[in-house]
């Protein structure tokens, strides 16, 4: 039981990091130079990091929820066979 929590924590950490890398890669396709004011390099980089974290977290949460729901489908099938 305790090892189950360890596995879920490890999957969550890896998922967060992988989807942040995917979000960072995807954001590189956008041209932010037209949206950022001149001489605001630090703020532009900070915005880039915040957007990467936000998109990565959203994608990771979707993936982890989907994984959890797919694991819970077995309980639905057991309930239906019980009826």
Image: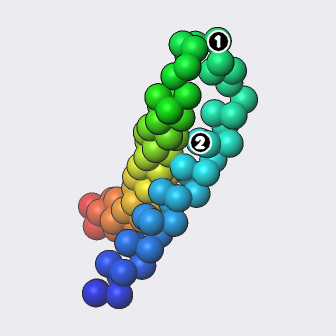
Q: Position of residue 12 (x, y in %)?
A: 43, 64
Disc ID at residue 23: 2
- Give SS at disc 2: helix
Q: Is residue 35 left or right of residue 76?
A: right
Q: Position of residue 80 (x, y in %)?
A: 33, 59
Quick one: quadrant of the N terminus? bottom left
Which of the marked residues, 2 or 1, is nearer the chain's N terminus?
2
Q: Position of residue 3 (x, y in %)?
A: 35, 87
Q: Is residue 32 left or right of residue 80?
A: right
Quick one: quadrant of the C terminus? bottom left
Q: Is residue 76 left or right of residue 37?
A: left
Asked whether residue 60 appears in the rendered view, the answer is yes
- Give SS at disc 1: helix
**Front in this rendered view, residue 81 or 16:** 16
Up-down: is 53 above or below 39?
A: below
Asked whether residue 55 appears in the rendered view, the answer is no
Query: To which residue does mark 1 refer?
Result: 34
Q: Residue at x 40, y 60 (%)?
A: 68
Q: Position of residue 78 (x, y in %)?
A: 34, 67
Q: Residue at x 63, y 33 (%)?
A: 27
Up-down: is 33 above or below 23?
A: above
Up-down: is 7 above or below 44?
A: below
How many C-alpha atoms fall within 10 Å of the one at disc 1: few (<14), some, or many (≥20)?
few
**Front in this rendered view, residue 7 or 21:** 21
């Amino acid at each position: 039981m305790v090892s189950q929590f360890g596995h879920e924590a490890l999957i969550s950490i890896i998922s967060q990091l992988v989807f942040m890398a995917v979000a960072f890669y995807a954001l590189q396709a956008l041209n932010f130079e037209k949206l950022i004011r001149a001489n605001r390099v630090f703020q532009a980089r900070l915005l880039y990091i915040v957007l990467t974290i936000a998109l990565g977290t959203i994608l990771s949460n979707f993936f982890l929820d989907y994984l959890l729901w797919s694991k819970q489908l077995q309980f639905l099938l057991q309930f239906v066979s019980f009826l």
